[in-house]
């Protein structure tokens, strides 16, 4: 997958209000495995930092021009070229600095030992299935505050601070329990239901706004030997990309807030029950592609691009990640989730969109200034435009699209955000409680239900139990919307 991620208390400060009409797409890192708290408690390693350099107009962070810099990038849906290109700019600006660049899909496996030893790299793209739990990292004070980066002059306009060049909500998403900003989300992701407009047109159908209409479209697809839906069965935490905003549409944003806050009985809300039953109906009526529970994200996307299924819940990184198998005339499109009916609390168009691809600078990194400088370069117009052209997604930089021909997926995502207006939601549970979201709610609850091994009522009871356990667990940091 591309990516998805984040965490904490202060993050709740009006996040939904802040991410309103941003016309941008990107990838987001979907957190997966929990980052063991033990990895954040070691005192081993050296606390030595490189000496600061001279602060100048061109070097507002006072980067040591000769100090080594180490960067580790998640090699997922966005690839690594955009980061390598930005690294080349750093090397040009600081020719005496030796930059070590590496990539991996196993962020946690590779970097957890280094956090234990107190020798982490200077900049990390903490994304993918093995994303480190950022709630744990923040709670254990393992991350550097990025406020110096945000208050530094931007590359393009020295009269503007970096923070003033970012899309709405990006800064706040990196906050957890106060003013410090621990994470810089580089991409901007639109989550929803993705499909081929060509395939939908072939059914003489339009995107369904009510669940009865959804079932009718799926029935049409089935008659043409096409499944209505598929999803990443081995990673069923993809299902919330469309399910969570559907819950908000049906019951209001307060239902998602209660879930994020781990409130008692939050999962027992009627809106949750209605949405679970709706999704379960897809399974009961045979509208899920056969074998889906055994497919990973790439396999499910390939089956979808091959026309074996009409709809797939995903993030905007899918346009780049599935490019190799996507026909040129696929006409990729995304829509906000289908609702239940006219009694829903929020209008059709309610969608989930937020910052993605989380970059962090470890507190014990040797060259924290260099790590932040690399991010400052990435947040320039040139690097942003390079990212958008290369991976078909927009960045946290509020611009960088002039002269670029937007791809079908990008155009559709922008249109979806325009339609949503103020009705953009941003569930935080996947950021605040990674293990709970991915391993328990996703695999243990939703995955089991969609495979037919749990009824909606059983899944809700099981998930509420998981949430209650997390709420009572004093070993993890808890966060709430303010």
Image (spheres, rainbow, N blue to C red):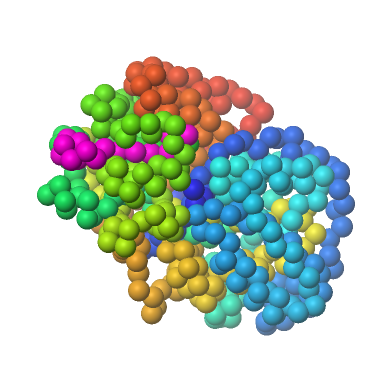
**Residue extent of the magenta highlight:** 218-234
Q: Is residue 462 above or below residue 258?
A: above
Image point 42% across, 57% down: which residue? 324
In the rendered image, residue 222, in percent from the top left (x then y), is placed at 20, 36
In the rendered image, residue 264, in percent from the top left (x then y), is placed at 45, 23
**Residue 468 is at least partly visible in this image:** yes
Image point 16% across, 37% down: which residue? 223
**Picture quarter containing residue 420?**
bottom left
Tell me if 77 is positioned left or right of 252 in this view: right
Image point 22% across, 38% down: which residue? 225
Is 154 colored magenta in this rendering? no
Q: As rendered, which of 223 and 117 lies closer to the eye?
A: 223
In the rendered image, residue 201, in percent from the top left (x then y), is placed at 17, 53
Q: As rendered, which of 450 and 344 lies closer to the eye?
A: 450
Q: As rendered, which of 336 and 98 lies closer to the eye?
A: 98
Q: Is residue 186 above or below residue 36?
A: below
In the rendered image, residue 249, in percent from the top left (x then y), is placed at 28, 40
**Picture quarter containing residue 159?**
bottom right
Q: Is residue 379 above or below residue 417?
A: below
Tell me if 222 is positioned left or right of 451 in this view: left
Is 223 colored magenta in this rendering? yes
């Amino acid at each position: 997958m591309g990516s998805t991620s984040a965490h904490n208390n202060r993050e709740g400060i009006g996040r939904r209000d802040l991410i309103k009409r941003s016309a941008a797409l990107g990838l987001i890192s979907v957190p997966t495995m929990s980052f063991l708290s033990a990895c954040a408690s070691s005192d081993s390693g050296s606390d030595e930092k490189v000496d600061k350099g001279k602060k100048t107009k061109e070097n507002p962070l006072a980067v040591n021009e000769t100090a080594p810099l180490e960067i580790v990038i998640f090699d997922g849906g966005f690839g690594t070229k955009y980061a390598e290109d930005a690294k080349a700019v750093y090397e040009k600006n600081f020719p005496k600095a030796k930059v070590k660049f590496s990539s991996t899909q196993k962020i946690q496996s590779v970097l957890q030992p280094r956090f234990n030893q107190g020798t982490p790299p200077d900049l990390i793209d903490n994304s993918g299935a093995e994303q480190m739990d950022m709630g744990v990292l923040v709670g254990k004070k393992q991350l550097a505050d990025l406020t110096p980066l945000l208050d530094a002059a931007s590359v393009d306009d020295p009269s503007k601070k970096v923070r003033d060049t970012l899309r709405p909500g990006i800064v706040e998403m990196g906050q957890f329990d106060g003013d410090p900003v621990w994470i810089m989300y580089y991409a901007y992701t639109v989550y929803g239901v993705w499909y081929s407009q060509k395939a939908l047109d072939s059914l003489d159908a339009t995107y369904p706004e009510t669940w009865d209409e959804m079932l009718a479209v799926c029935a049409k697809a089935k008659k043409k030997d096409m499944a209505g839906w598929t999803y990443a069965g081995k990673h069923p935490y993809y299902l919330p990309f469309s399910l969570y905003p559907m819950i908000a549409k049906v019951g209001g944003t307060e239902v998602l807030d209660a879930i994020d806050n781990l409130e008692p009985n939050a999962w027992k809300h009627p809106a949750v029950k209605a949405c679970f039953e709706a999704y379960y109906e897809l399974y009961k009526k045979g509208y899920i592609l056969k074998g889906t529970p055994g497919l990973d994200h790439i396999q499910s996307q390939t089956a979808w691009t091959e026309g074996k299924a009409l709809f797939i819940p995903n993030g905007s990184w899918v346009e780049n990640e599935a490019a190799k198998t996507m026909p040129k005339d696929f006409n990729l499109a995304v829509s906000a989730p289908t609702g239940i009916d006219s009694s829903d609390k929020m209008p059709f168009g309610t969608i989930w969109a937020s910052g993605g691809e989380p970059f962090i600078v470890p507190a014990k990194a040797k060259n924290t200034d260099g790590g932040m400088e690399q991010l400052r370069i990435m947040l320039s117009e040139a690097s942003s435009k390079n990212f958008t052209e290369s991976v078909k997604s927009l960045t946290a930089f509020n611009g960088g699209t002039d002269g670029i021909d937007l791809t079908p997926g990008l155009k559709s995502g922008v249109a979806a955000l325009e339609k949503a207006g103020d009705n953009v939601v941003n569930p935080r549970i996947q950021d605040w409680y990674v293990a709970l979201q991915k391993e328990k709610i996703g695999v243990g609850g939703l995955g089991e239900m969609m495979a037919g091994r749990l009824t909606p009522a059983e899944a809700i009871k099981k998930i509420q139990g998981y949430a209650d356990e997390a709420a009572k667990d004093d070993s993890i940091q808890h966060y709430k919307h303010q």
